[in-house]
Amino acid sequence: ETGVTQSPTHLIKTRGQQVTLRCSSQSGHNTVSWYQQALGQGPQFIFQYYREEENGRGNFPPRFSGLQFPNYSSELNVNALELDDSALYLCASSLEGPKTQYFGPGTRLLVL
Amino acid sequence: GNSVTQMEGPVTLSEEAFLTINCTYTATGYPSLFWYVQYPGEGLQLLLKATKADDKGSNKGFEATYRKETTSFHLEKGSVQVSDSAVYFCALSETIQGAQKLVFGQGTRLTINP
């Protein structure tokens, strides 16, 4: 069974740029959630995708957007990067409904 | 909204000591509760969970009991090892707009000295 994978592992961008982060869900999982973890903090929910649709969103602005593909993999896109976007971005996969979420290793983004 | 509060760290113990990390929550209804662990430079790993009141989750010597009356889910281990050094997160699940999301505490950094 393949776990959740994310790419890239690290990324450095400058303010105003755009970034795309990728996630492959665990085998058989059809739901993907994205979280932002600032340094020294707990993860904060960004949004969740199920059946290629966003079905729930946390308190993040529209410049955070996503996609889910037919194979359940997902992308997180962030436009107009700000310094405060520097964080570890975590992807978690699960089955639909109130099921346990399993996390990938994360992508560490640094915005200069 | 729902929230999770963990005891502040860092926590430093000697090997074989008894561990307790306190976690309390505020929620409407009875959410599922989780402990996740994050080793340096890694993502989160599920440590244990409990889905209803009085359930006890356990894994790798760690235990936590879902206490509805005190809205708590404290993490315990009888004898810690150096390899248990990590950051521990308590979390609850809630539904938002049809999505199941996790609400995390701020994390507790644990260091075990040999």
Image: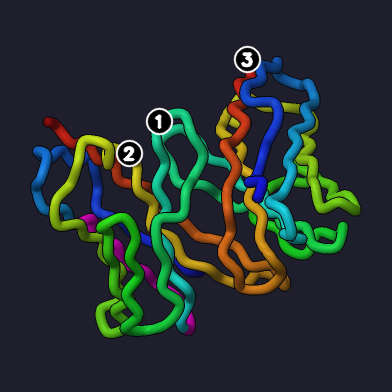
In the image, taking residue A8 as reference, residue A80 lies left or right, namely right
A63 relative position to B58: left or right: right
Give the residues in magenta: B20-29
Check disc 1 and report the residue beneath it.
B40
Q: Chain of mark 3?
A: A
How far apart marks 2 and 1 lie (CA) works out to 7 Å
Is residue A53 covered in magenta? no
Chain designation of label 1:
B
Query: Can you give x and y, in whole percent of width and height, for residue A36 in the image?
Result: 59, 42
**Is residue A46 in sight in this rendering?**
no
In the image as oriented, which residue stretches furthest toward the right?
A70
Residue furthest to the front: A1
Of mark 2 and mark 1, the one earlier in the sequence is 1
**Pointer 3 and pointer 1: residues touching (CB < 8 Å)?**
no
Q: Are marks 2 and 1 in contact (CB under 8 Å)?
A: yes
Of residues A18 and B49, the one drawn nearer to the viewer in this rendering: B49
Residue B86, numbered label? 2
Residue at x-position 72% and y-position 72%: B98
The residue that appears at 66% across and 20% down in the rendered structure is A11
Q: Which residue is mark 3?
A: A112
